[in-house]
Image (spheres, coloured by chain):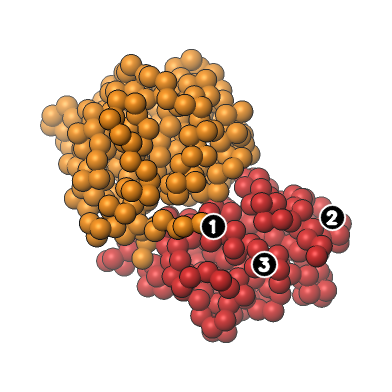
Amino acid sequence: MLTKRLIACFDVVDGRVTKAQQFQDNIDVAPAEDLAQQLYEDQIDEIVFYDITASAQKRKIDLDTVRRVAQHVFVPFTVGGGIRSVEDMFAVLKAGAEKISIDSMAVRNPSIIREGAEAFGRQCVVLSTQVKHVGVSAGLPSGYEVFIDGAREATGLDALDWVRRGEDLGAGEIVVNSIDRDGTASGYDLEITSAVADAVNVPVIASGGAGNVDHIVDGVTTGGAQAAIISSILYSPRFERNPSVRELKTALSERGVPVRPYLDA
Amino acid sequence: MMNRVAIIDYGMCNLDSVQRALEECGASATITDEPADLDHADRIVLPGVGAFGDAMARMRARGLDTALKELVLGDGVPFLGICLGMQMIATVGEEGGETPGLGWIDGVVRRLQPNAVDRRIPHIGWNEVEARGSSTLLQGIPPRSDFYFVHSYHLDCDVDADSAGVTPYCGEFTSVVERGAIFGVQFHPEKSQQHGFRVLKNFLAY
């Protein structure tokens, strides 16, 4: 059967992976290519890489780092940050990525989702959303609002309206990234994750808050997600101990979650 | 053994990972959109993502369809289609309007039909492949091993014997086709870690 994916997420600054808490206070972890290689050998299912300062600094994505990460990684690789056009997307794909993640730019210019899907197929376009619980109001029936630019700017968009629109425009996958839970290790926001999973018919990826195996199990069961983005648990120095992908998969399997089994060389 | 592999480039997609994976498996792989370059190849790989109709139009515009036919059907040069590249060897594709394919494998490329269990399209992620009969590509790979898939359409074979492997999603679809020296995989061997390398090595050894 189709297994649940464990996706390692890198927030990259100047070629190095950093780890933030609720989109702030980034601490340095390791060079992106070294961490990618280590996690690939540990049989992570997929890697996603955000050039987190590209958008704010209004510069192009760091293609050199994308190339170096892609060099030895033979699992799917998604890249996001600072992508403004189909040309930018093509440059990232040529640098070795399979998929493009768009977030703030998609809110500013939603037609980029359609243009990307038409040019490269919808499986190439991942719509990433930063959502925050703000309470139900007239314009926000789900009680969750979409934010952009590293969670700094509110958009007034309702999270569920936005993901439905993104799917209609051609997004092939949706990432639900909870601003409230980001870096907190307190578990995914299951309420909005499952609401998004019900609202769309493309794969949904839970993001923000995974601190232990139970959280991952909850994300792909109660949360209804097809994949779980993990980061802190894998490599944050704030954790007393970072489990290996192998350990996580064994634990998930023991709890009845279908995963790609770890293979001995 | 010589293993010069030509990877066909007919437009906008990432072929670097296919090239790197083939080189990891010991081949010498070059990317080309020139029909003349294919004459020097011991094997041909046709990768691809995107839409069927668009991809076929790009192939025809470059004369790649005619060149491939001569080499693969005429001279028997081993051929591997990956993802959309597997779909393009079918008789016809339904994506983006009915479009004739290369027509080497009898069958139609149809959209996956969601059901109550598998309602999400595209089919994205690691899913199992079960060999049917004695598959060349799946040799040495444990039954029901996982490979990485990302697609919304699948090749529905008219001839059962062409289907060398199947995958359970939206019912069951053919994920490996084999007929003589013509091979196709719906998954991405270049993104499927060890098992993917084994599939590529099996192709290179054929």
The one nearer the camera, B138 or B163, is: B138
Across and down, in percent, residue B65 comes to 75, 63
Q: Nearer the viewer, mark 3 or mark 1?
A: 1
Who's the residue at 71% across and 75% down the image? B181
Q: Which of marks 1 and 2 is in front?
A: 1
Q: Which corner quadrant of the image does residue B48 belong to?
A: bottom right
The one nearer the camera, A42 or B33, is: A42
How far apart are the two marked residues, 3 and 2, measured between alpha carbons? 20 Å
Residue at mark 3: chain: B
Precedes in sequence: disc 3 or disc 2 = 2
How far apart are the two marked residues, 1 and 2, measured between alpha carbons? 30 Å
The one nearer the camera, A71 or A130, is: A71
Which residue is label 3 attached to? B203
Secondary structure under the numbered disc 2 in the rendered image? helix
The kind of residue on which mark 1 rests is Gln
Q: Is residue A60 visible?
A: yes
Who's the residue at 52% across and 33% down the image? A34
Which residue is label 2 attached to? B37
Which residue is label 1 attached to? B194
Residue at mark 2: chain: B
Chain B's colour?
Answer: red
Secondary structure under the numbered disc 3 in the rendered image? helix
